Amino acid sequence: MHVLDWNRIDESQRRVSLRRPAQGARAVLAENVERILSQVRADGDSTLRALTRRFDGCELGSFRVTEDEFAAAEAQVSPALKQAIANAIERLVKFHEAGAPRGYALETAPGLNCERVIRPIERVGLYVPAGSAPLPSTAIMLGVPARIAGCSEVVLCTPPKPDGSVDATVLVAARLCGISTVFKLGGAQAVAAMAYGTESVPKCDKIFGPGNAYVTEAKLQVANDPEGAAIDMPAGPSEVLVIADAKASAEFIASDLLSQAEHGPDSQVLLISDSQALLESVAVELEKQTAELPRREILAKALTHARLILSRDIPQAIEISNRYAPEHLILQVEQPRQWLERVRSAGSVFLGALAPEALGDYCSGTNHVLPTYGAARAYSGVSVASFVKLITVQEVSAEGLNIAGPDAAEMARAEGLIAHERAVTRRLAAIKEGRA
C-alpha cells in the first residue's frame, strides 16, 4: 500500500485522501427506497411478503418469531456463547446505568421552581443486520439501553435466512435482553414496517440500528416524514482510524484495521503515524494477515479505500483525525491518555495497545452503535439517553411571577409579541389586585 505524506500534498489532495467511499448512485438509491417505503405504507404485509421473497429468497406466512423458534434457537447456541453474551450484557448494564440521564429540580429564583423529568420513549424499533454476517452483538447494544430506559414496547427486526429462519444467536441475545417481539424482516422494508406499521408490525416512535445503504437511506427518509419515525443517527459503512507512534505494534495495528475492514467492501480503515518505518511495516503485515483470513475477498475490496498517512508528529495526527471524525479511534501511542483531551470528534476511543476495537464491538460495556461517515462531528453513540425524552417543568408562585414576570414582559415587547406580554402582565395585575 502507498504511504501518503500529509505535509507534501496540497489541500485538495488532503480532502481526497480523507474522502469516504462513495455510496453508489445516490439518486437511484433514494428513488428505490422511496418506492419501497410507499409500497409498504400502502399495502402493508402483502408488500412485506413480496419484498422478503425477492430480497431474502424465502416465503413467509408469518413474520413474527414464535416461542418454538426461540426455544429452538436456545438449543442451538452453545453454553459458552450464551455465557459470553450474558457477561457482555452485565458490563453493558453497568456502563449504561452509570451514564443514564437523571432528573433534577432547583429554584432559579424565589418561587420559581424548574425541573427536568425523564420519560421513556414508549415504542422503539431495533434493527439488527444479518447481511454477510449476523450481528447478535447489535441486539444487546440496542436492547440493554432500551431496557434500562424502561421503554414499554421493544420491537426487533432482523433479516431471515433463505430457509425462513433467523440467526439463532440473534434470538438468544434478544431474549437475554428481555425482547420477545422479533420480526423476520430486513432492509428498507423493515424500516418502513417499523416507521408506518402494518397488520403485523406495530408502528414505532423511534428506530435504532445500523445497516446497509438501503437501511440508512430508509431511516433518513422516514425521519424526514412527519408521519414516519425518529431515528438514532445518520450512519454509513463502518470505519476505524488508528494513530500510532514508532513503538507501536505493526501486528496489532494490522489486526485492528482488518477487523473493521471485514465488515464490508465499503468499510474504511486509516492509519496515521509519524513513523515511515511503522507505516511500511503495517502495509506488509496487512498483506500477510489478509491471506490468513476467510473473508479475503471482502477485505481486498475494503482495503482499496484504506489510507496510510505520514504525519509530522502525533499532535498533527490527532488534528487529521478530528477532521475525519472517525467512528472508532484507536490511540496506539505511548501514554495514550495524555492525548485524549485533544480528541474532539470520534464515536468511540480506544486507548493503548491492549484496547482492540473488537472489544468495544462486543463486551467492554460501551456501545458499538456509533455515528459514521463523519457524523461524529455532531452526533454521539447510542446510550440510555437515546431512548428517553427529557421534559422540563416549571412551577411558579406569586412571588416567582413578580420576580421573573417583568423580564418576560420586557423581552416579549422587544420581539413584538404582545400576546406573550399580556399573558404575563394580566397575571401580574391579578396578583396585585388580589385576584390570584
Image (cartoon, grey):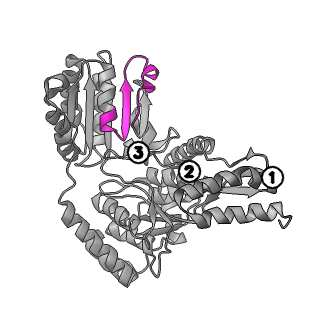
Give the number of the mark in front: 3 or 2: 3
**Whole-Å distance between the Cαs marked 3 and 1?**
41 Å
The magenta stretch spans residue 332: yes
Above or below for 137 versus 9: below
Identify the residue at image location x=32%, y=79%.
Answer: 39
Sequence-wise first label, 2 or 1: 2
Picture coordinates of residue 64, whole percent (x, y): 47, 73
Q: Residues within 10 Å of mark 1 (few under 14, many from 20)?
A: some
Pointer 1: what residue? 399
Pointer 3: what residue? 378
Asked if disc 3 and disc 2 are in contact, CB closer than 8 Å, the reply is no
What secondary structure is marked by label 3?
A: loop
What's under tag 3, amino acid-wise?
Ala
What secondary structure is marked by label 2?
A: helix
What's under tag 1, amino acid-wise?
Glu
The quadrant in which the C terminus is found is: bottom right
Q: Can residue 59 be spotted in the picture?
A: no
What's under tag 2, amino acid-wise?
Ala
Q: Which residues are magenta?
A: 322-345
Identify the residue at image location x=21%, y=27%.
Answer: 309
Task: From the viewer's perspective, tell me whether residue 161 is left or right of residue 99.
Answer: left
Sequence-wise first label, 3 or 1: 3
- Asked which quadrant contains residue 23, the reply is bottom left
The quadrant in which the N terminus is found is: top left
